[in-house]
């Protein structure tokens, strides 16, 4: 309790300090605005490391709890309730890491209305961190909905040609899911008289008879966010139109909010429904894996390709979650981080190419390795990481997921893992094809001769991601140590429901 | 008249007398200094708020059972008075700009507010009727205040014709109820119903007619047709005032009569009110989608919000939830009122003479050129659609919660899905303001900005600490005899 402020409060709301400073800067002081935003987000990252230092590995429960009554009235009890555990700690770190990187990537890409851009970015960071830390359903909902607003503006103002369409679609899709979730939250609150996560886990028998419906209402909100097939159609639009920094955050963090929601709420609150519905969700996840990969194969636009590959990769995460073994769930959590790192980096590089040539068509490039060797080398590492080459992060996550899924008793069939493995092969195809078309072969387009290689700033945005890509790939144990206790706890909770059902 | 009688209507008398004196005093205020009239009117309303605050916690049935003073009435009276002050804030510059600056304007507004206050305290059907007329007649005039602009005159005439038509329904309903129960006092009606000496056929017919009459006042579907035209034609501050206060007054009296005097009936009326609520939410939101004129858009939005408020009326039929239904309705009224006034303030700032500057295209680029105004409007739009970190979210949250608890989950579902529709058209305003470029022309007036920015701040700050206001609303439940 340094400074008298709870660390979780500090990590969530610190970006507001920078926001206030930016408000007092003049619109023309672009450089000062950028530096303030960057400094704020870096300090926030520092605070999140401080939270990590206080985090006790090996404890499965909620740590650093902060619980204050927020609203108490005639049977209504809403808490300002935050806490962190193995499921959320990495998500918070991912958020606070990707935000400064995204801000740095927008350094020269965003020249118009810099002030608004940075304000929305910092607001977005507050919302995202809040989502991962909130443990009261109402507080969670508030943060969850709140993240929509800044992202909506980031796409709608700084996006590409069809930005307004994409922004509105993004908003309405997410809103449609979350309204049903709100109804489910109200029903739960009515039946138990509380919205606090830990109380609800303890009292889940009270709403057990409704749990299929509640599961579906929560699940719809999360499935849209992940996004799972067939609710994914907003994602390619949003990604293609969003500015690079927005795409990085969208893929890196916002999608994870959906998967995290499954882990945090669906599994522990509705375990019987989870067990019952897991095979169906796993089938959707596998369709998503194959479908996303197949559509990626057909893309000519690099950003679209990466966007559809997200559908495929997130399919693995959901498959891991609903295979309901310790291994698969832990792999799923790690894969969430991995996807944030690799896809974030892919979007960054695609954005750098776009900034140079104002096109993302693969046919406009080809053989540019010779001109931009540094970019080519980095892109190769990131591509290999995304397709799951052993020794890099993607392999660790996907392998653990598939291993866990293979032995899953809930799914009860090795076919799930078998078919999902096809997705890994397809990923190798479409990613390598992209790499080949853009970087290898003869230099076809003359304009590419003048391409500049990466600047120091651009390398700086990629290096932290690359370090983590190697670190997780070569020595993932510290990450699993953070994740595992909470995952074991969660899985044993769900499997006790499985035993009770028999 | 005893002292208790006098005390129970002291704020009403004050506002009325003040208005009458102001009407005379205005004759000596030169045309160039009409701001003085506005200021004096606002002071009168502020005095009314002060006196109403002194009544907090009191409870009395006065004038031989015709007037009720309870915390419900006091809460509403403060809403009316406050909305009057906000409306004056919107009007001052607008009237000058549109060349319709006349002192009667403020006086008429005060009269109408006095009528609303009387309505919230009425405990006798004839007093209810008188109060409704008392609040409506000044509004008919105010709607046509922008004469000789044609659409203002049209609005006035439409409002007048449909208003009197609905008053006819109301009066006929009262007559039938008198026939059925031999009394027009709410206490007497309740006693007669409990005593079992009522002609129920007559009574139900009467209650249904009263429901139609009030349905017109609050612009619930299918009695909403007048609202868009009237809101569009009336001087904009008057539209804002009507959208907030008249709606609040209509719902207040609806709750008062149906919950106090017809409690046994309200259960039988549930399917009807359920239908009206659902229909109002669906139709109001659907019709708003295609609107490009901001005044019409806000008019349809106010119809849709009448549907949400009706939900509270449905939940109130569950005896266990009556208290929380009333509280959540009052809370919603405050949330809606504050937000709506803010939104109308923005509309007033952009409106040009001859009804120009009201189309969505005229809002292009506002967010860029006038960030504070843009952000304020953003806050209002988010609040109206019920997105968190605005007071509108809590309004919907409490309302839907009560509805779920009272066992009307399907209605809550309809409410949620229609609010998804509403997100679309509210966001359209935001799209124009922030995502399209244009050369907006904005009127800068400090009172207008004060209302807009103040309301926006209140909408956000009250959402961070929602409990205090809800506590107050919860204490303001009806005194059931």
Image (cartoon, helix red, strand yellow):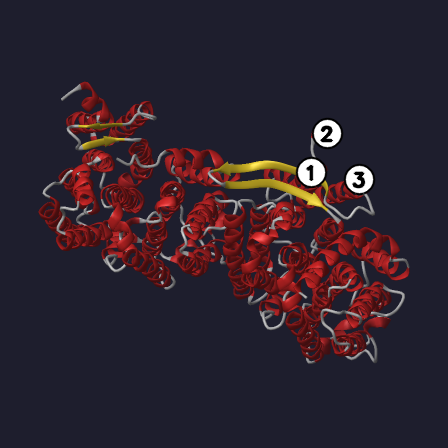
Depth check, front residue: A82 or B262: B262
Depth check, front residue: B250 or B183: B183
Res. A437 image quadrant: bottom right
Of circles 1 and 3, the one toward us is: 3
Depth check, front residue: A374 or A265: A265
Left/right placement of residue B381 relative to residue B63 reads right
> Residue at image x 26%, y 53%?
B219
N-terminal-most mark, 1 or 2: 2
N-terminal-most mark, 3 or 2: 2
Q: Distance between the residues labelled 1 and 3?
A: 14 Å
Q: Is residue B279 above or below residue B404?
A: below
Q: Would residue B336 be seen by someone viewing this image from the given angle?
A: yes
The residue carrying pointer 1 sits among few (fewer than 14), some (14 to 19) or many (20 or more) residues within 10 Å by Cα, namely some
- Mark 1 sits on what residue? A10
> Label 3 lies in what chain?
A
Q: Are marks 1 and 2 on the same chain?
A: yes
Q: In this view, does A78 lie above or below A260?
A: above
Query: Mark 1 near mark 2, Cβ–Cβ under 8 Å?
Result: yes
Q: Which structural element holds mark 3?
A: helix
């Amino acid at each position: 309790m340094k400074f008298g402020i709870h660390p979780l409060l500090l990590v969530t709301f610190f970006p507001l300090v920078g926001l206030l400073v930016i408000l007092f800067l003049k619109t023309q002081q672009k450089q000062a605005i950028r530096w303030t935003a960057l400094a704020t987000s870096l300090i926030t990252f520092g605070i999140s490391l401080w939270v990590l230092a206080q985090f006790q590995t090996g404890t499965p429960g909620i740590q650093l709890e902060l619980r204050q009554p927020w609203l108490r009235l005639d049977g209504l009890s809403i808490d300002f309730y935050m806490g962190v555990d193995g499921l959320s700690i990495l998500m918070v770190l991912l958020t606070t890491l990707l935000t400064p990187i995204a801000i740095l990537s927008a350094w020269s890409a965003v020249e118009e209305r810099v002030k608004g851009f940075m304000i929305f970015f910092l607001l977005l960071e507050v919302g995202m961190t809040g989502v991962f830390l909130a443990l009261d359903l109402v507080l969670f909902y508030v943060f969850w909905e709140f993240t929509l607003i800044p992202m909506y503006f980031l796409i709608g103002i700084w996006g590409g040609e069809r930005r307004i369409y994409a922004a509105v679609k993004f908003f309405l899709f997410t809103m449609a899911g979350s309204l049903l979730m709100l109804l489910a939250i109200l029903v739960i609150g009515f039946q138990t008289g509380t919205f606090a996560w830990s109380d609800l886990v303890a009292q889940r028998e009270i709403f057990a008879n409704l749990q299929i419906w509640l599961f579906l209402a929560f699940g719809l909100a999360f499935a849209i966010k992940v996004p799972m097939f067939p609710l994914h159609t907003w994602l390619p639009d949003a990604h293609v139109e969003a500015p690079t920094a927005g795409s990085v955050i969208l893929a890196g963090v916002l999608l994870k909010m959906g998967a995290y929601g499954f882990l945090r709420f669906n599994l522990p609150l509705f375990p019987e429904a989870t067990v019952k519905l897991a095979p169906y969700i796993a089938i959707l996840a596998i369709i998503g894996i194959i479908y996303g990969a197949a559509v990626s194969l057909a893309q000519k636009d690099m950003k679209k390709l990466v966007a559809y590959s997200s559908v495929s990769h997130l399919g693995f995460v959901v498959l891991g979650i609903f295979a309901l073994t310790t291994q698969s769930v832990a792999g799923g959590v790690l894969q969430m981080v991995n996807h944030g790192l690799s896809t974030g980096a892919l979007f960054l590089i695609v954005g750098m190419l776009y900034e140079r040539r104002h096109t993302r068509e693969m046919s406009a490039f080809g053989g540019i390795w010779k001109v931009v060797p540094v970019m080519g080398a980095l892109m190769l590492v990131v591509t290999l990481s995304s397709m799951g080459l052993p020794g890099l992060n993607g392999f660790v996550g996907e392998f653990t997921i598939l291993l866990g899924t293979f032995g899953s008793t809930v799914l009860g069939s090795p076919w799930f893992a078998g078919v999902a493995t096809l997705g890994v092969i397809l990923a190798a195809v479409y990613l390598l094809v992209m790499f080949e078309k853009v970087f290898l072969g003869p230099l076809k387009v003359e304009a590419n001769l003048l391409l500049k290689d990466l600047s120091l700033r651009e390398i700086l945005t990629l290096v932290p991601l690359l370090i983590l890509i190697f670190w997780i790939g070569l020595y993932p144990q510290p990450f699993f140590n953070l994740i595992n206790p909470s995952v074991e706890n969660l899985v044993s909770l769900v499997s006790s429901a499985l035993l009770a059902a028999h | 008249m005893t002292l208790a009688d006098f005390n129970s209507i002291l704020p009403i008398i004050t506002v009325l007398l003040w208005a009458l004196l102001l009407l005379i005093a205005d004759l000596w205020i030169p045309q160039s200094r009409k701001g003085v009239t506005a200021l004096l009117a606002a002071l009168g309303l502020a005095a009314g708020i002060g006196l109403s605050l002194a009544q907090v916690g009191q409870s009395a049935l006065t004038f031989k059972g015709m007037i009720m003073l309870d915390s419900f009435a006091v809460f509403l009276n403060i809403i009316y008075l406050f909305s009057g002050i906000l409306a004056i804030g919107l009007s001052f510059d607008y009237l000058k700009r549109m060349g319709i600056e006349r002192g009667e304007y403020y006086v008429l507004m005060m009269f109408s507010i006095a009528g609303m206050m009387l309505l919230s305290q009425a405990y006798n059907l004839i007093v209810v009727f008188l109060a409704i007329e008392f609040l409506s007649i000044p509004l008919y005039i105010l709607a046509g205040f922008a004469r000789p602009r044609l659409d203002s005159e049209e609005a006035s005439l439409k409002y007048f014709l449909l208003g009197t038509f609905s008053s006819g329904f109301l009066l006929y309903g009262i007559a039938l109820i008198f026939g059925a129960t031999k009394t027009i006092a709410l206490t007497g009606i309740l006693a007669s119903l409990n005593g079992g000496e009522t002609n129920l056929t007559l009574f139900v017919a009467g209650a249904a007619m009263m429901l139609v009459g009030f349905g017109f006042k609050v612009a619930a579907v299918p009695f909403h047709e007048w609202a868009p035209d009237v809101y569009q034609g009336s001087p904009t501050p008057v539209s804002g005032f009507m959208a907030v206060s008249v709606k609040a007054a209509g719902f207040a009296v609806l709750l008062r009569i149906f919950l106090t005097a017809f409690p046994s009936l309200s259960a039988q009326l549930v399917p009807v009110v359920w239908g009206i609520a659902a229909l109002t939410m669906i139709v109001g939101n659907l019709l708003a989608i295609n609107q490009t004129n901001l005044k019409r858009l806000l008019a349809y939005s106010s119809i849709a919000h009448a549907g949400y408020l009706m939900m509270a009326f449905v939940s109130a039929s569950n005896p266990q939830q009556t208290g929380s239904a009333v509280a959540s309705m009052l809370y919603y009224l405050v949330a809606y009122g504050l937000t709506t006034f803010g939104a109308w303030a923005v509309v007033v700032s952009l409106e040009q003479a001859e009804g120009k500057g009201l189309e969505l295209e005229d809002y292009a680029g506002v967010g860029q050129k006038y960030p504070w105004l843009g952000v304020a409007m953003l806050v209002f739009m988010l609040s109206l659609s019920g997105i968190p970190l605005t007071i509108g979210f809590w309004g919907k949250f409490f309302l839907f919660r009560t509805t779920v608890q009272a066992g009307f989950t399907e209605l809550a579902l309809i409410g949620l899905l229609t609010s998804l529709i509403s997100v679309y058209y509210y966001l359209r305003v935001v799209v124009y303001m922030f995502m399209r470029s244009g050369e907006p022309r904005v009127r800068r007036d400090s009172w207008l900005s004060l209302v807009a920015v103040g309301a926006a701040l209140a909408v956000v700050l009250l959402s961070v600490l929602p409990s205090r206001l809800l506590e107050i609303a919860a204490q303001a439940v009806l005194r059931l005899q």
